[in-house]
Image (cartoon, grey):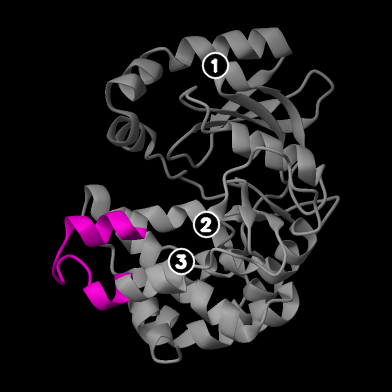
Amino acid sequence: MPATPRDELHATVTRTWGAEGAAWLTGLDRLTARLARELGLRLGPVMPQSFHSVRAVICPDGTPAVLKTGVPDGHLDAEIAALRAYDGRGAVRLLWADPARGALLLERAVPGHDVTILPDDDAVAVIAGRLRVLHTAPVPAGLDQVRSERDALAAHLRRFPGDDPLPRRLVSAAASLWCSSAPREVLLHGDLHHHNVLAGTREDWLAIDPHGRAGDPGYDCGQLLYNPLDADPVLLAARAPARLERLADTVGVDPDRALAWGFAVCVLSEVWNAQDGPVDGTALAVALELERGL
């Protein structure tokens, strides 16, 4: 893990949940202390965190773990369901959860560095291999369908009639390409990229932070295309076609379908950015490159 953990918790939670998030942050220290007492945990340092509080902990038997808590509005229920379905195959194990309090106790990946330490081709191979394993898990009942995320594209087109903040043709194309049917439906991680695959012990690499959706496996080919964080967007755009080729082959997705999903997911990422802030530009650069191959 980085020597100085990334800590965007207060800014992200208040931006995302407003007054509800601010109230949760006020009680976070009390909640953490209460959970530590109940579970017999020894609290360690804060780990990189943005939407959720993430603390390194030691279990009563000496096992290293992670205590993850978030605003208890139900948004963590899908992650809990996905981790239970994975049952430790390709992902960290869920050791305990209290959905009503938005709390999860997770296996800690040790040594825990992410795949950014690898050359890019090797990192993509690792991520693709994790997806292949994760997609074999049973699909829990009640998960949101990824096809519903097309609604954000349609809402953007209604809100923004021109090419600001995103070229309208890209959003229209993504909406048209968004697949309402799938040759097969799998349990999707929903956000598997370089920073969500950590080095482990019982398996070489373990996925963390699944969003937990159901749908076309091609959807999971999109998120790593605009990662890792702080990478040069020009370089990411240039790498995108080869990355997609590797993903499609390993995950078992038709190459044209992987291309369509990669493009659409990159556009959706920028549409989400545009909802409450400036367009990042990284996923946009990748989408513009992939548009050439559609």
Q: On the picture, is 132 further left or further right than 115? A: right
* Residue 163 quadrant: bottom left
Residue under the point 70% across and 34% down: 106
- The answer to which of marks 2 and 1 sits earlier in the sequence is 1
Q: Quadrant of the C terminus?
A: bottom left
In the image, residue 172 sits, relative to residue 62, either above or below, namely: below
Magenta-tinted stretch: 153-171
- Of the numbered discs in the image, which one, if any, rests on residue 32? 1
Q: Amino acid at mark 3?
A: Val
Q: CA distance from mark 3 to mark 2?
A: 11 Å
- The answer to which of marks 3 and 2 sits earlier in the sequence is 2
| SS assignment at label 1 | helix
Q: Nearer the viewer, mark 3 or mark 2?
A: 2
Q: Amino acid at mark 1?
A: Thr
Q: Amino acid at mark 2?
A: Arg
- The answer to which of marks 1 and 3 sits earlier in the sequence is 1
* Residue 63 quadrant: top right
Residue under the point 57% across and 63% down: 194
Position in image of residue 201 (x %, y %) = 82, 51
Q: On the picture, is 67 further left or further right than 202? A: left
- Of the numbered discs in the image, which one, if any, rests on residue 130? none
Q: Is residue 231 visible?
A: no
Position in image of residue 15 (x %, y %) = 28, 35
- Of the numbered discs in the image, which one, if any, rests on residue 265? 3
Q: CA distance from mark 2 to mark 1?
A: 36 Å
* Along the viewing direction, whichever of 34 and 152 lies nearer the viewer: 152
| SS assignment at label 3 | helix
* Along the viewing direction, whichever of 170 and 282 lies nearer the viewer: 170
Residue under the point 60% across and 31% down: 77
Q: Nearer the viewer, mark 2 or mark 1?
A: 2
